[in-house]
């Protein structure tokens, strides 16, 4: 895609002449006959630079420069001034113009100035993107999808097919299954890999704050809006925007999001100027959105716009041998971060990890691996160290469960572990001589999962003095999930009403 430059002049002949010169230099030229039209063109076309005449009726070049600076202070503006009028040139530079050219000018002179302006814009945007990724980004720059199970091979194949498309992606799966990693992998293998990727957790903000985060706001748009702020769609222009937990947005925002997906257009809060952006949206959810549509809580037209390229992620319990691969991967990550030699799990620990039902999925496994790496005194992590954690960690809310047609079905052994059936027999790791029984390894009678979960959550809340955010983080579940569980147990009088 060629770089856009906006040419502003009230004289048609001048617009055509300047436009033709820049087109021959390889730029895409858009033109405006006055300042008001120019402001709308900037919002719609997002040019890399503006070339404007200084002397124009109604709104001159200096006023246009000031108005543009209010919405985008980094947009380079080149002013065309009359020959010999050095005072106008000085005024232009003081007002913030990138440069000026005096009429009549040679085409090569104009092209040189515009080339420097465009390069300046590119460098500024690269720095801004890096800062935005630090504040709002979605994690490591080089995502790594770990897994060799049939289910994950299928996911990897989908990613390969989807990455080069421009369509919207909907990733569905239980909490902790790695939806964000998949989203980053798609971006990293897409034509936009060298552009910005931002993410936003839709469940973490109120509807009014979420609207401002998505679309930005003008100065004075509401109480506390003391300066103009760009939203994620504007910041992610040309790149990718990850909308996490898309199912949590309000009906009003669902309508506004639908318009962006359909037309690529929106207005900042408090503004009547329509912005045009080119953003690829990847949405994630742990709910069954089709069911939410049936229940009337999610717009059907938005669902179809999001569900262009769907990916369903399997829970960790359906990924078989991936568990030990992931465990070693997480131990290596810890070692790399701390500058130490990576530790490893012994055979008993590997058997326990493989047998566990992982209600918190990959996030829970990562939590245990990091804890084990820190607390293990030697280089080999024993089963005795991790056994109590597998006993007491709670089952998280399952949320969305991918359809059996889209995933490799769980083995009978995995189903037995989840449903509390007779003891699961798991093949021993690394050549051990006999199978390991989960019940035997644990050495205790198995309690109902919900009872274990409830006791653990109540205990954790006590440890964190009732702080739900810290409790949820420690347990590897979402704050909203924690709140829903407590609400249900209060209604059943299973926990104190004061929790």
Image (cartoon, rainbow, N blue to C red):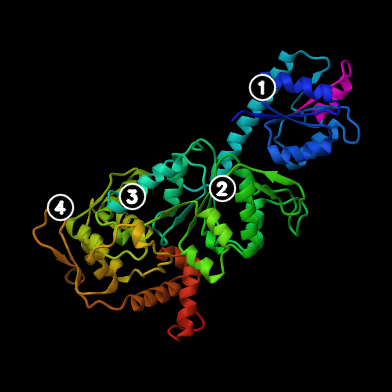
Residue 216 image offset from top left, x and y in percent:
68, 51
Q: Secondary structure at mark 3?
A: helix
Q: Say if mark 3 contacts mark 1, CB within 8 Å.
A: no
Q: In the rendered structure, find residue 50 and report the number of the disc placed on it.
A: none
**Between tags 1 and 4, which lies in front?**
1
Magenta stretch, residue numbers: 77-94
C-alpha distance separating marks 3 and 1: 46 Å
Which residue is drawn at the image coordinates 15% and 52% (left, top)? 430
Residue 233 image offset from top left, x and y in percent:
62, 47
- Where does label 2 land, which residue? 135
Q: Secondary structure at mark 4?
A: loop
- Where does label 3 land, which residue? 154
317 or 448, nearer to the observer: 317
- Where does label 4 land, which residue? 430
**Between tags 3 and 1, which lies in front?**
3
Q: Say if mark 1 contacts mark 2, CB within 8 Å.
A: no
Q: Is residue 438 left or right of residue 57?
A: left
């Amino acid at each position: 895609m060629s770089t856009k430059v906006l040419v502003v002049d009230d004289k048609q002949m001048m617009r055509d002449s300047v436009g033709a010169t820049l087109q021959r230099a390889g730029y895409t030229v858009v033109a405006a006959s006055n300042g008001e039209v120019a402001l709308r063109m900037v919002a719609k076309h997002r040019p890399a630079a503006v070339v404007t005449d200084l002397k124009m009726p109604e709104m001159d070049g200096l006023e246009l420069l000031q108005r543009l600076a209010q919405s985008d202070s980094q947009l380079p503006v080149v002013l065309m001034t009359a020959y010999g009028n050095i005072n106008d040139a000085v005024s232009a530079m003081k007002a913030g113009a990138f440069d000026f050219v005096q009429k009549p000018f040679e085409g090569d002179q104009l092209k040189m100035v515009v080339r420097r302006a465009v390069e300046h814009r590119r460098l500024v945007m690269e720095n801004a993107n890096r800062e935005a990724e630090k504040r709002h980004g979605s994690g490591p720059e080089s995502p790594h999808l770990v897994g060799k199970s049939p289910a994950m091979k299928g996911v990897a194949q989908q990613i390969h097919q989807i990455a080069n498309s421009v369509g919207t992606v909907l990733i569905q799966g239980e909490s902790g299954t790695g939806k964000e990693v998949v989203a980053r992998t798609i971006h990293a293998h897409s034509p936009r890999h060298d552009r910005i990727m931002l993410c936003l957790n839709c469940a973490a903000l109120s509807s009014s704050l979420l609207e401002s985060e998505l679309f930005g706001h003008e100065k004075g748009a509401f109480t506390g809006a003391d300066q103009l702020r760009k939203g994620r769609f504007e910041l992610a222009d040309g790149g990718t925007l990850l909308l996490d937990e898309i199912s949590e947005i309000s009906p009003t925002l669902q309508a506004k999001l639908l318009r962006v997906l359909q037309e690529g257009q929106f207005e900042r809060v408090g503004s009547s100027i329509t912005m045009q952006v080119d953003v690829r949206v990847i949405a994630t959810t742990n709910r069954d959105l089709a069911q939410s549509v049936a229940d009337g809580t999610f717009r059907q037209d938005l669902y179809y716009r999001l569900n262009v390229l769907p990916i369903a992620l399997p829970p960790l319990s359906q990924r078989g041998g991936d568990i030990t691969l992931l465990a070693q991967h997480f131990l290596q990550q810890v070692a790399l971060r701390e500058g130490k030699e990576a530790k490893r799990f012994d055979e008993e620990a590997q058997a326990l990890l493989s047998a566990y039902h992982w209600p918190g999925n990959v996030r829970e496994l990562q939590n245990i691996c990091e804890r084990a790496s820190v607390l293990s005194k030697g280089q080999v992590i024993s089963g005795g160290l991790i056994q109590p954690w597998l006993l007491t960690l709670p089952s998280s809310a399952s949320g969305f469960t991918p359809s059996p047609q889209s995933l490799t079905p769980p083995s009978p052994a995995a189903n037995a572990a989840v449903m509390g059936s007779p003891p699961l027999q798991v093949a021993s790791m690394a050549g051990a001589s006999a199978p390991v029984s989960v019940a035997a390894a644990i050495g205790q009678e198995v309690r109902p999962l919900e009872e274990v979960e409830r006791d653990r959550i109540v205990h954790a809340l006590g440890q964190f003095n009732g702080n739900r955010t810290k409790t949820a983080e420690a347990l590897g579940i979402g704050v909203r999930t924690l709140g829903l569980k407590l609400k249900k147990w209060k209604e059943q009088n299973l926990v104190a009403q004061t929790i």
